[in-house]
Image: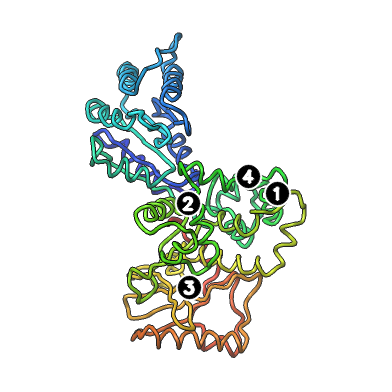
Amino acid sequence: MIGRQKECRILDELLKSPESELLAVIGRRRIGKTYLIREHYKQQLAFDFTGTQHAKADNQLKKFATKLQQYGKYTMPPTVPPNWAQAFEQLTVYLSGLRKRKEKRVVFFDELPWIDSHRSGFLNELSYWWNDWASQQSIIVVICGSAASWMIQKVINHKGGLHNRVTAKIHLQPFTLSETRKYVHTINPKLNNYSILQLYMVFGGIPFYLRSLKKGDSATQSIQRLCFDKDGMMRTEFENLYAALYDKPERHISVIKALATKWKGLTRKELIKLTGIADGGGLTKILTELESASFIMTVQPFGKKKKNMLYRLIDEYSLFYLNFIEHKRAGNQNIWLQTSQNQVYKSWRGYAFENICIKHAYAITQALGISGMHTSVSGFISKGVQVDMLIDRADDVINLCEMKFYNDDILLTKEDAATLRRRRTLFIEQSKTKKTVFINLITSFGLRSNQYSEDLVDQIVTIEDLFLLKNF
């Protein structure tokens, strides 16, 4: 298994625990939650049931009975339970009849938000079953869902029988660049870091997307095939992605599209104006759900109050789709090669690279030699100056990070140097900071030394440094 070392340690600890364990696994669609549980617990899995989206309770119960027949190896299928109370009674009978083993058994309920359909009563019966029987049996019950905010609200923060019953939680994140490289190299081992970074800008660290790469394809060929060819898998993924997570995804998509229009991010007030969504709990819920699923992030600008919080789109695929795939006809065999020469592409790749740097901020602190120090990452926007990433350090130093994605070493011109000096001066003046301010360049390959760079750029971080981060 690529990566997931921290998560696997948690799963192993639950096996060793003398108590029953209720594990909640959350994370966005396509992230690999189901694979993690089925692969790691394949020797202990006693029962596994996955919900069906938009299916009514009677349909879910029929499928539950079929699963029980498969696991129990019954010659005759068990009676389809009329409700979830009797379904859990059947599950109890089956599990009680299993031969005793030293290792714990694992019961896995996947896509819980889909199982708990309207008025099904599933969640109440699950909580009763856990409290009345399962919690006393020394088993592991795994509950999993892609709708992270639903899982947090309905399960982890449950007000009823599941309140404080979850004993462990895994929030599965996308692969880092380091993990992505390991995964990609199992398919296409000759791709270098620059090519893998280009793929990451489009697909992020989402294993389901990356597994569709082909041996021998360049990054450009892979993006063309998956995103622009007539039968490209990623052409229709955008609508499916949000529809699978939210019952009424239109307003979520409206927020995503609004955030895609402004690189620096949007304030809540700006979002209301662009989307037409009224201020209040409804908007808060949408933003919380999108952030829980790692589609967006909140950024509090340096020195600003919470009301100035910015919302920033950080999902690589959504950003790429809205810039290049939406409203584009499929079938042009050279469209990505042509597109990658224009200004829209250059603007997009700059923003996408910034997002990757922000997500890999710890790798940057490692490269700067300050990973053991307390730091906070933010941005700064004021009159005439914008800094997309700064690192505020406990040793009275601030690192202003200039992020540049380029296909070669960068050579600073006189104009570039003047811009950086002006940005540093304006930041010091307008933030009124008393700290020492360093300028750092984060770039693809490095910086050619000349008269403009030697006394201006304090440290350089390259993509090789970003690939050293093993876990977020």
Crowding around mark 4 (Cα neighbors within 10 Å: few <14, some 14 to 19, many 20+) is: some
Is residue 360 visible in the rendered structure shown here? no
Residue at image mark 1: 225
Mark carried by residue 388 = 3
Q: Is residue 463 above or below residue 221?
A: below
Q: Where does the image place residue 177, in percent across and percent down from the top left?
A: 52, 57
CA–CA distance in space, label 1 to label 4: 10 Å
Tell whether 205 sits left or right of 288. right
- Residue situated in front as seen by the camera: 342 or 440: 342
Crowding around mark 3 (Cα neighbors within 10 Å: few <14, some 14 to 19, many 20+) is: many
Q: Where does the image place residue 461, in percent across and percent down from the top left?
A: 52, 72
Residue drawn at point x = 36 percent, y = 42 percent: 151
Label 4 is placed on what type of residue?
Answer: Ser
Label 3 is placed on what type of residue?
Answer: Asp
Residue at image mark 2: 251
Residue drawn at point x = 37 percent, y = 80 percent: 397
Which tag is nearer the camera, tag 3 or tag 2?
2
Label 2 is placed on what type of residue?
Answer: Arg
CA–CA distance in space, label 3 to label 2: 27 Å
Whichever of callouts 2 and 1 sits on the residue coming sooner in the sequence is: 1
Label 1 is placed on what type of residue?
Answer: Arg
Residue at image mark 4: 212
Q: Residue furthest right?
A: 333
Residue drawn at point x = 43 percent, y = 34 percent: 114
Whichever of callouts 3 and 2 sits on the residue coming sooner in the sequence is: 2
Q: Are the two marked residues, 3 and 1, in contact with CB atoms closer than 8 angstroms?
A: no
Numbered disc 4: secondary structure: loop
